[in-house]
Amino acid sequence: EAQVTQNPRYLITVTGKKLTVTCSQNMNHEYMSWYRQDPGLGLRQIYYSMNVEVTDKGDVPEGYKVSRKEKRNFPLILESPSPNQTSLYFCASSLREGPYEQYFGPGTRLTVT
Amino acid sequence: GDSVTQMEGPVTLSEEAFLTINCTYTATGYPSLFWYVQYPGEGLQLLLKATKADDKGSNKGFEATYRKETTSFHLEKGSVQVSDSAVYFCALGLGGSEKLVFGKGTKLTVNP
């Protein structure tokens, strides 16, 4: 089954404790992206990757890091989480040369206390 | 810059009512337009799309027509069901770019 998976689905952590949210897709997509969803703000892009070893900032990259060492994986790293990063996070992927349909993961709800 | 504006919710309807969710956009160039749906507890999934002016996207009884003259892509359904309760996002994508620009979402609740 074609899908994007994220782990964990739910995470409660404390300020300053480094964490990683994993994202994996099995569709051989070149393009992957991270979004955060906040009430009244919709979805905002954090980082994206056009292919292995190629990443770039989206609209709200502050406080986040990403890496793309393999085509299927695109982890999101919060080196020192803060309460304003409490949000619902989505990973998505698509073919390149789009805009093609983006496939979304189920989401990770992060709470930083 | 490129942006999408959609009607604010929440929208509450009775089963079998007619649904319209308005969406307008601002874009340089000629975007493709999308409606995504997010059911409770799930990620977004594509509902329908249109890639050029006057195209009509349709799926699951929902329709939207790409209107270049009014820069709009309104979502409609003739008879909603309880199972249509979800958040609906309008989005645009520019040719040659994979990036999608989303509206803020409209929450729809359908009561039996």
Image (tube, coloured by chain):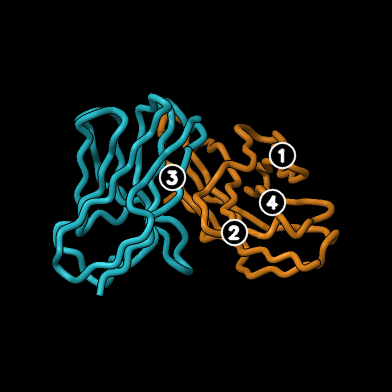
Are the residues flagged by discs 4 and 1 in contact, CB closer than 8 Å? no
* Same chain shared by disc 2 and disc 1: yes
Q: How far apart are the two marked residues, 4 and 1, measured between alpha carbons?
A: 14 Å
**Which residue shows up at 21% across the image and 58% down it?**
A62
Q: Mark 4 points at which residue?
A: B74
Dot 4: few (<14), some (14–19), or many (≥20) neighbours within 10 Å? some
Say left or right for A108 vs B91: left
Disc 4 is attached to a residue of which chain?
A: B
Dot 2: few (<14), some (14–19), or many (≥20) neighbours within 10 Å? many
Q: Earlier in the sequence, mark 2 or mark 1?
A: 1
Disc 2 is attached to a residue of which chain?
A: B
Frontmost of labels 2 and 3 is 3
Q: Mark 3 points at which residue?
A: A105
Say left or right for B19 vs A7: right
Q: For the residue marked with disc 1, what is the amino acid?
A: Asn
Q: How far apart are the two marked residues, 2 and 1, measured between alpha carbons?
A: 16 Å
Q: Which chain is orange?
A: B
Q: How far apart are the two marked residues, 3 and 4, measured between alpha carbons?
A: 26 Å
